[in-house]
Amino acid sequence: MQLARILGTAVATVKHPSLSGAKLCVVQPVMADRIAADGDPQLAIDTIAAGVGDLVVITSDGRLLREVLKSDATPARWSTVALIDNA
């Protein structure tokens, strides 16, 4: 699991069938100080209705994504799992 800040959303006209109807977010992983970037921005499936600027927890748990997307195979890696209060 990793802290990340929502930078925005992404739109894809052509995507894997498992991503149909999924909200795609661009997230910036951050360090424990909640400010410094920790790597490159990533694309995540939003499962918690987060908005731009929100601090969230993301995970690369493939099993969770397969359950959320109702697909046995999906190219998605990251998903949001928690919204951090007092960000």
Image (cartoon, helix red, strand yellow):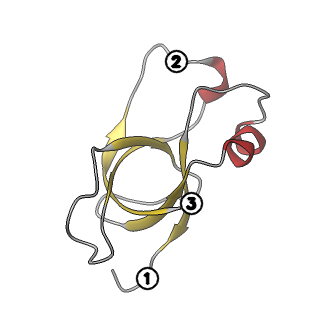
| Relative height, residue 35 to residue 38 (above, below) | below
Closer to us: 40 or 85: 40
The earlier-in-sequence mark between 3 and 2 is 2
Q: Name the residue under label 2.
A: 15
The earlier-in-sequence mark between 2 and 1 is 2
- Horizontal arrangement in the rendering, residue 33 relative to residue 85 (left or right): left
Q: Distance between the residues labelled 3 and 2?
A: 21 Å
In the rendered structure, find residue 48 and report the number of the disc placed on it: 3
Residue 85 % position (x, y): 43, 82
Does residue 85 appear anywhere in the picture? yes
For residue 53, which quarter of the picture?
bottom left
For residue 20, which quarter of the picture?
top right
| Relative height, residue 11 to residue 24 (above, below) | above
The earlier-in-sequence mark between 3 and 1 is 3
Q: Please, what secondary structure does the residue beneath circle 2 have? A: loop
Q: Residues within 10 Å of mark 2 (few under 14, many from 20)?
A: few
Q: Which amino acid does label 2 sit on?
A: Lys
Contact, mark 3 vs mark 1 (Cβ under 8 Å): no
In the rendered structure, find residue 85 and report the number of the disc placed on it: 1
| Relative height, residue 46 to residue 37 (above, below) | above
Does residue 20 appear anywhere in the picture? no
